[in-house]
Image (spheres, rainbow, N blue to C red):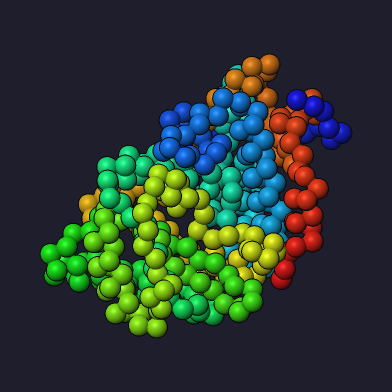
């Protein structure tokens, strides 16, 4: 831990434990690397885990402050991410407790959400010996049509699942995920579904019915392929790309996507698989052996790391690379 030049804060931070129960994440997969065999690293090095969280917080604040400046209907939620999510860490011995915003544009929350979903669904999918990865798309749409289009896509799949397949005596089983990306060349949006389905026969039937509903959707743009455990991991990573292929961050277009997805589920299980809530707990506690040098401390977020309010020490020593700082300084597009 190193010191930074900063005026000491006398503010106090406390959590009412009678109202907010701390939730431990010991059983969650630690997302330190992409699994190649279906197993996950336990992240033995606590400092690396904390540095990755600092990096996620730095990146999230870097673009979310621009989203908040749009003064869109989501402005309050954007500010909650900037000023309320993992902003203050309360340390008691080796345990750190903090609050989370639970917003989809937050990379800190997405890491926790990803771990939660993988732990819940991976054992189920490992019981599917012939599981496949199905992608369903439709033609791109302009921003003003995006929310209505997404709602129609969700409704269409429910119709396929609950009417068409049942009439054929087919009970499909799996998980549906919604993704949406922005195309800066065409200035439009690409909502699409990814599925993990029990077997190829079920996927083929879903695809057949999908093309009946969306005849303008090209067959070659749909895809069915073998699903591995690594594929499952990739499925849970994000629902939209913050940085697109041209290395730019399109702020207004991201806001359109987030507004269009408000109160809609990204993940939806079907066929008897129990649904898992996408939300994470308001307060989460984790233990780090790295923190053994202090009994208690209050850490406040400052630019790119958490700083001890009493001593001025930084928690992780994380510093963003020059390339990363350049992206968030020069590649913002309105």
Q: Quadrant of residue 308?
A: top right
Q: Is residue 295 left or right of residue 15?
A: right
Q: Is residue 85 left or right of residue 122?
A: right
Q: Residue furthest bottom?
A: 216
Q: Position of residue 19 (x, y in %)?
A: 46, 36
Q: Is residue 332 left or right of residue 268?
A: right
Q: Quadrant of residue 316?
A: top right
Q: Quadrant of the N terminus?
A: top right
Q: Position of residue 72 (x, y in %)?
A: 62, 68
Q: Residue at x 23, y 61 (%)?
A: 201
Q: Residue at x 53, y 48 (%)?
A: 110
Q: Report the number of discs.
A: 0
Residue 20 visible to an observer of this rendering: no
Name the residue nearer the viewer: 165 or 130.
130
Q: Position of residue 61 (x, y in %)?
A: 68, 51
Q: Residue at x 48, y 39 (%)?
A: 35
Q: Quadrant of the C terminus?
A: bottom right
Above or below, comparing residue 138 to residue 272 in the picture: below
Q: Position of residue 53 (x, y in %)?
A: 63, 39
Name the residue nearer the viewer: 262 or 135.
135
Q: Residue at x 19, y 70 (%)?
A: 163
Above or below, comparing residue 205 to residue 265 in the picture: below
Name the residue nearer the viewer: 330 or 19.
330
Q: Residue furthest right?
A: 5
Name the residue nearer the viewer: 303 or 273.
273
Above or below, comparing residue 226 to residue 144 in the picture: above
Residue 191 visible to an observer of this rendering: yes
């Amino acid at each position: 831990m190193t010191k930074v030049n900063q005026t000491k804060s006398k503010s106090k931070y406390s959590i009412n434990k009678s109202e907010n129960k701390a939730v431990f994440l010991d059983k969650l997969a630690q997302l330190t690397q992409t699994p190649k065999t279906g197993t996950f690293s336990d992240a033995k090095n606590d400092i690396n885990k904390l540095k990755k969280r600092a990096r996620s917080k730095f990146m999230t604040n870097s673009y979310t402050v621009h989203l908040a400046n749009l003064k869109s209907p989501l402005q309050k939620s954007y500010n909650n991410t900037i000023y309320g999510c993992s902003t203050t860490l309360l340390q008691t011995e080796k345990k750190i407790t903090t609050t989370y915003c639970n917003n989809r544009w937050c990379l800190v929350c997405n890491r926790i959400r990803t771990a939660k979903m993988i732990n819940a669904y991976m054992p189920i999918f490992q019981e599917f010996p012939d599981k496949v990865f199905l992608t369903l798309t439709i033609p791109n749409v302009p921003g003003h049509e995006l929310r209505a289009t997404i709602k129609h896509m969700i409704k269409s799949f429910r119709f396929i699942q609950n009417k068409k397949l049942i009439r054929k005596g087919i009970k499909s089983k799996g998980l549906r995920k919604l993704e949406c990306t922005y195309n800066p060349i065409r200035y439009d949006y690409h909502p699409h579904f990814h599925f993990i389905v029990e077997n190829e026969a079920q996927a083929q039937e879903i695809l057949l019915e999908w093309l009946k509903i969306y005849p303008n959707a090209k067959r070659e743009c749909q895809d069915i392929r073998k699903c591995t455990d690594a594929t499952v991991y990739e499925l849970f990573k994000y629902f939209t790309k913050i940085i697109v292929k041209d290395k730019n961050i399109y702020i207004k277009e991201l806001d359109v996507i987030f507004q269009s997805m408000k109160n809609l589920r990204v993940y939806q299980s079907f066929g008897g698989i129990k649904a898992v809530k996408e939300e994470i707990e308001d307060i989460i506690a984790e233990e780090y052996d790295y923190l053994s040098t202090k009994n208690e401390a209050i850490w406040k977020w400052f630019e790119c790391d958490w700083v001890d309010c009493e001593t001025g020490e930084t928690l992780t020593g994380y510093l963003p690379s020059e390339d990363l700082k350049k992206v968030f300084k020069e590649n913002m597009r309105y």
